[in-house]
Amino acid sequence: MRIEITGPIAHTKTFEIHQDDEDSRVVVPGAAASNRAEFMSGHGTFYDGDIIVASVAGAVKQVNKLLTVQPFKSRYRPNVGDVVVGRVVEVQQKRWRIDINSVQDGLLNLANVSLPGGELRRKSAEDEMRMRMYMEDGDLVVAEVLNSNEGGIQLQARNLRYGKLGQGLLVKVPASLMKRRKTHFHDLHFGARVILGRNGWIWIQALEEDGTAETGGYTENTATVSLEIRAVISRIANCLRILEQSLQPIYETTLIHAYNASLEFEVSELIKPEIMDEVASEVRNKIALSEE
């Protein structure tokens, strides 16, 4: 869901910045956030005479005298340890370049990948020649952010839990909705495995029979997925769209609540606006009850 605000804004509202008043920290493009004498303009703002005006819709953040606006929707900003789902865009010398929905592509070095067998060893010239056998352009991959600096975003696939993804469905949502959790790999009881990438890319696949298969993508399961499991995957994808449209944080709890609330409807009905609102309202109520 994307909202674009264009054209001149007839009325602007001045917000007084108080450290304890969170409600006054939300602005829209063209809204005056503060006057120039009190604060300095940071990201997401610009000077208009003697006032600081927001250039994006988001939350006002203050660090000492620096005023910034953090947009509600923006490209992913990586942090060390984040689990991300990306797509290989180029195979380079000793590394793969991966689109992870960020301002820069991620770099997955051959030395940071667990190869078939899972043994930790130095990568040889033979491994470099076989890079396209492991992952090629267009393949989806799950990895972890190793570090992020001016030189680029370094990724790693430190064990066979990470690596190339096989059969499944990719859903893209704003990265700002993804909530940081201890684990982003979830084997759900209704027959699907979900990887909630912190970059807003979510992978859904059929749950393996033993529930623990981790091959790093080097052994692909090409078995036919049953119609029942495909319906489950489609229902999960529609539930993610409902959470996205209602701007609710996306993590395993809200996803399970949305799935359970959607069971009284057919999968095809979950794209109807009135039903999406009903499921979203049910999720909000359950989250509110759990927090009491």
Image (cartoon, grey):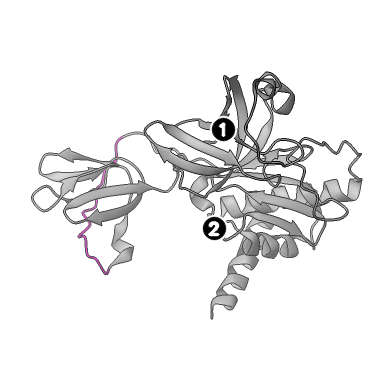
Q: Of discs 2 and 1, which sits in the foreground?
A: 1
Q: Mark 2 falls on what kind of element? A: loop
| Quadrant where the N terminus is found in the figure | top right
Q: Position of residue 91 (x, y in %)?
A: 61, 21
Query: Counting residues from the N terminus, which is met first, the one under dot 2 or under dot 1?
Result: 1
Does residue 270 appear in this view? no
Spot the residue most to the left: 37
Q: CA distance from mark 2 to mark 1?
A: 28 Å
Q: Which residues are magenta?
A: 8-20
Q: Residue at x 72, y 28 (%)?
A: 134
Dominant SS of magenta comes to: loop
Q: Position of residue 6 (x, y in %)?
A: 37, 34
Q: How many marks?
A: 2
> Disc 1 marks which amino acid?
Leu
Residue 108 marker: 1
Q: Position of residue 255 (x, y in %)?
A: 66, 59
Q: Quadrant of residue 22?
A: bottom left
Q: Which residue is mark 2?
A: 249
Q: Residue at x 45, y 47 (%)?
A: 79
Q: Quadrant of residue 212?
A: bottom right
Q: Residues within 10 Å of mark 2 (few under 14, many from 20)?
A: some
Q: Position of residue 177 (x, y in %)?
A: 52, 52
Q: Mark 1 falls on what kind of element? A: strand
Spot the residue most to the bottom: 292
* Residue 104 left/right relative to 289: left
Does residue 130 appear in this view? yes
Residue 179 in the magenta stretch? The answer is: no
Residue 219 vs residue 19, the one in the foreground: 219
Residue 226 vs residue 214, the one in the foreground: 214
> Disc 2 marks which amino acid?
Pro
Q: Residue at x 31, y 48 (%)?
A: 69
